[in-house]
Image (tube, helix red, strand yellow):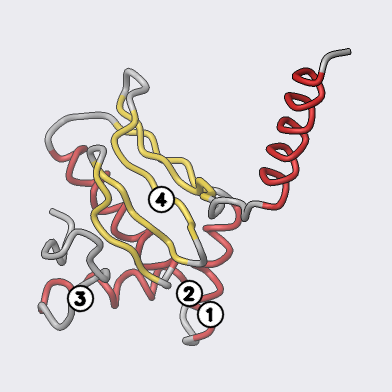
Amino acid sequence: MSIHSKARRDAKKRKAAKAANAPAPPAIEPHAEMRDSSGQLLGGIVRRDGEWTLGLGGRIVGGSDSAAKVLIMLKRAAALHERTGETVQLKFSPALSAAAAQEAADRGLSFEQFEAEFEKELAEGQRPPLESQSGGNEAVH
């Protein structure tokens, strides 16, 4: 065996050990998706580092600690598509549904009641629905 072969083996071992000790990238968990009738993804919700993030049209439009609020915003986006005659399909993870229901229950409300109150706040313009990730888009239209 040559000296060069040993050097290559040792370099591979060092590289493998370094990769094994590197911190893992933040986990991104998909929790909801909105698709059109042809199956194309229109929007969705993921959870990353404890924050619920809403994406629409291939762009991140906002994020929040509130599962209920991002779920309501995705439902609003679906309703907008349906008003234009486009059929959409929404799918939610059990974890997202449970987190949204628990958030409403913590306030003594059903999810439907929480949704109605939040819709009323949005209509009155009392506060932005999501903390913006894009630096200016406060609401989803």
Mark 4 vs mark 2: which is more N-terminal? 4
Q: Is residue 117 left or right of residue 89?
A: left
Mark 3 vs mark 4: which is more N-terminal? 4
Placement of the N terminus among the 4 image quadrants: top right
Mark 3 vs mark 2: which is more N-terminal? 2
Residue 137 in the image: above or below residue 86: below
The residue that mark 3 highlights is 120
Whole-Å distance between the Cαs marked 4 and 1? 21 Å
Query: Element type at marker 1?
Result: helix
Residue drawn 23% across and 54% down?
61
Q: Residue furthest right?
A: 1
Which amino acid type is marked by label 1? Ala
Residue 41 in which image quadrant: top left
Disc 3 packing (10 Å; few <14; some 14–19; many ≥20): few
Mark 1–mark 2 contact, CB under 8 Å? yes
Q: Nearer the viewer, residue 77 or 59?
A: 59
Disc 2 packing (10 Å; few <14; some 14–19; many ≥20): some
The residue that mark 2 highlights is 110
Whole-Å distance between the Cαs marked 1 and 2? 6 Å
Which amino acid type is marked by label 2? Ser
Mark 1 vs mark 2: which is more N-terminal? 1
Residue 63: image location, x then y, percent: 33, 63
- Mark closer to the observer (4, 2): 4
The residue that mark 4 highlights is 45
Which amino acid type is marked by label 4? Ile
Q: Is residue 3 left or right of residue 108?
A: right
Residue 82: image location, x then y, percent: 21, 38
Residue drawn 25% across and 62% down?
133
Which amino acid type is marked by label 3? Lys
The residue that mark 1 highlights is 105
